[in-house]
Image (cartoon, rainbow, N blue to C red):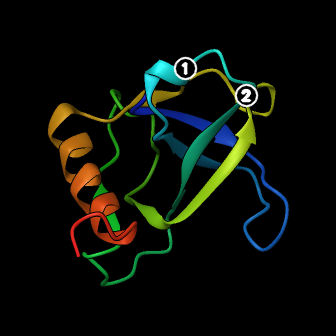
């Protein structure tokens, strides 16, 4: 599992149904027992500052138009994640990095 991979996970709480998620944790922390993920939804919203829209493709493994919810970052044990179902394209990962910088207050 690498940064930018899409996996399937079911987290506890309000967003608990099985859903895709993007690995956003640094590959330098690959030995840790958990990883940081941004959850993905097919419920689209007009929120480009906090959501990255993805079109389905064979490369990313998504079945419908979806959005990465950069405001929904969760830590999950690696063994609760599926093997990667796909991957973000390089330009999508760069866009997600910019959104995460805004969400996390790194560019206030």
- Between residues 6 and 24, which one lies in front from this camera angle? 24
Q: Residue furthest left?
A: 91
Q: Is residue 23 above or below residue 50?
A: above
Q: How many circles with numbers are drawn on the protein?
A: 2
Q: Secondary structure at mark 2?
A: helix
Q: In the drawing, does residue 107 fall left or right of residue 105?
A: left
Q: Residue at x 55, y 20 (%)?
A: 1
Residue 30, picture quadrant? top right
Q: Are marks 1 and 2 in contact (CB under 8 Å)?
A: yes
Q: Is residue 2 visible?
A: no
Q: Residue at x 46, y 65 (%)?
A: 69
Q: x and y percent of residue 28 in the render?
A: 46, 20
Q: Is residue 21 above or below residue 41?
A: above
Q: Residue tagged by mark 1?
A: 1
Q: Residue at x 64, y 15 (%)?
A: 31
Q: Residue tagged by mark 2?
A: 78
Q: Residue furthest top?
A: 31
Q: Residues within 10 Å of mark 1 (few under 14, many from 20)?
A: some
Closer to the chain start, of discs 1 and 2, is 1
- Between residues 45 and 37, which one lies in front from this camera angle? 37
Q: Residue furthest right?
A: 12
């Amino acid at each position: 599992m690498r940064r930018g991979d899409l996996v399937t996970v079911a987290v506890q709480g309000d967003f608990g149904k099985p859903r895709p998620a993007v690995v956003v944790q640094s590959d330098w922390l690959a030995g840790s027992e958990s990883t940081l993920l941004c959850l993905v939804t097919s419920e689209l919203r007009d929120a480009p500052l906090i959501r990255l829209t993805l079109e389905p493709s064979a490369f990313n493994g998504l079945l419908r138009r979806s959005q990465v919810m950069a405001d929904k970052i969760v830590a999950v044990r690696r063994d609760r994640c599926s093997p990667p179902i796909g991957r973000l394209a390089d330009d999508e990962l760069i866009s997600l990095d910019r959104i995460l910088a805004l969400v996390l207050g790194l560019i206030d």
